Image: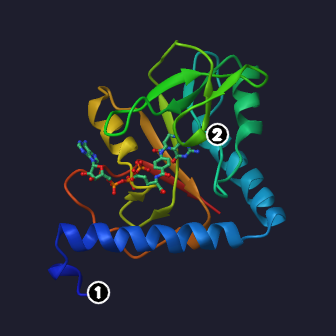
C-alpha cells in the first residue's frame, strides 16, 4: 500500500479517502485562534500575490470544515473595484460555476448546504483561490474528492491563475497524481 509505484488507481482513491479524513481532522483540531491568525496571514500574503485592482475577478469560497476564512479579503477586493466570485456546485460530476458575491449580498443554501450567491449571474475568474485539504511539492491539490476544481479548470480557456491556500500541516509528500489532476500555479501556506 505504501509502495508508491505499485499503487493502482483504485488503491490511490482509497488512500486519498483516508488521507482526506486525516487531514481534515488535523485542520479541525487547530484551535480557532490559530486558524484565525493563520487566515489573516494567508490573506495578507494573497493580497500581495494577486494585487487588488479594479476589474480583477477572483474566485474565493465560503469557508467550512476549518478552511481559512478569507472573507475580509473578499471585502477588500470589492472595495478596490474588483469582483469576488464564489464556486457553485450545479451537479455532482459537472464543472463548478462561479457567481459574483459581495459582503452583505444574499446567499442561499446550495449542494452540501454550502452557502452560494442568490443570483443566476456567472463569470470566469482571472484568479482562482483553491482551498486545500492536502498539497504536495509538485503543487498538486487534494480536495474533498468531488473532482470539481480539476473538472472546472479542464473546461476553462484561458485557464485562471490557480492559487492553493492552506495550513502547513496539510503538506504531504505526494498526492499520487493521476492523469486528471491539474497542478496549481502557486501555493500560499502558513
Ligand atoms: N469552501 C469550499 N467551497 C467549495 C469547495 C471547497 O473545496 N471549499 N469546492 C471545491 O471543489 C466545491 C464543493 N466541493 C465539495 C466536494 C465534496 C464534498 C463532500 O462533502 N463530499 C462527500 C462525499 C460525497 C460524494 O463523494 O458523493 C464527503 O466528503 O462526505 C463537499 C464539497 C465548491 N465549494
Ligand atoms: N476533468 C475531469 N473529467 C472527468 N472526471 C474528473 C475530472 N477531474 C476529476 N475527475 C474525477 O473526479 C473524481 C475525484 O477526483 P479527485 O480525487 O482529484 O478530487 P479532488 O480534487 O480531491 O476534489 P475537489 O476538486 O472537489 O476538491 C475522480 O473520480 C476523477 O476521475
Residue drawn at x 63%, y 33% is 51
**Which residue is disc 2 drawn over?**
62
**Horizontal side of residue 34 vs 2, given as left or right:** right
- Residue 179: horizontal and vertical position, in percent? 19, 55
Q: List x then y, in percent, for residue 162.
A: 44, 42
Q: Quadrant of the N terminus?
A: bottom left
Residue 70 seen by the camera: yes
Check the picture and name the quadrant holding the C terminus.
bottom right
* x and y, in percent, of residue 29 in the image: 70, 72
Read off the residue under disc 1.
Answer: 2
Callout 1: few (<14), some (14-19), or many (20+) C-alpha neighbours within 10 Å? few
Q: Secondary structure at mark 1?
A: loop
Image-based side of 17 in relation to 177, left or right = right
Earlier along the polypeptide chain: callout 1 or callout 2? 1
- Ligand 1 contact, mark 2 (Cβ < 8 Å): yes
- Residue pictured at 34% horizontal, 74% vertical: 15
Q: Is 156 drawn above or below residue 129 in the view shown?
A: above
Question: In the rendered view, would you say 3 is above or below 75?
Answer: below
Q: Identify the image's colour scheme: rainbow, by chain, secondary structure or one colour.
A: rainbow
* Front-lying residue, 86 or 91: 91
Looking at the rendered structure, the secondary structure element under dot 2 is loop
> In the rendering, which numbered label is found on residue 138?
none
Is label 1 in contact with label 2 (beta carbons under 8 Å)?
no
Amino acid at each position: 500500500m505504501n509502495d508508491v509505484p505499485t499503487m493502482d488507481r483504485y488503491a490511490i482513491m482509497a488512500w486519498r479517502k483516508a488521507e482526506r479524513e486525516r487531514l481534515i481532522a488535523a485542520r479541525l483540531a487547530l484551535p480557532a485562534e490559530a486558524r484565525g491568525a493563520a487566515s489573516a496571514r494567508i490573506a495578507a500574503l494573497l493580497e500581495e500575490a494577486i494585487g487588488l485592482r479594479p476589474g480583477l475577478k477572483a474566485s474565493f469560497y465560503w469557508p467550512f470544515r476549518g478552511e481559512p476564512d478569507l472573507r475580509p479579503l473578499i471585502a477588500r477586493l470589492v472595495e478596490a473595484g474588483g469582483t469576488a466570485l464564489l464556486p457553485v456546485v450545479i451537479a455532482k460530476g459537472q464543472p463548478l460555476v462561479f457567481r459574483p458575491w459581495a459582503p452583505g449580498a444574499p446567499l442561499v443554501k446550495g449542494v452540501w448546504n454550502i452557502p452560494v450567491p442568490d443570483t443566476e449571474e456567472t463569470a470566469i475568474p482571472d484568479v482562482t483561490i483553491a482551498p486545500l485539504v492536502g498539497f504536495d511539492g509538485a503543487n498538486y491539490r487534494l480536495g474533498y474528492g468531488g473532482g470539481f476544481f480539476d473538472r472546472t479548470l479542464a473546461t476553462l480557456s484561458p485557464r485562471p491563475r490557480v492559487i492553493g491556500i492552506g495550513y502547513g500541516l496539510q503538506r504531504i509528500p505526494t498526492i499520487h497524481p493521476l492523469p486528471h489532476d491539474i497542478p496549481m500555479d502557486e501555493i500560499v501556506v502558513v
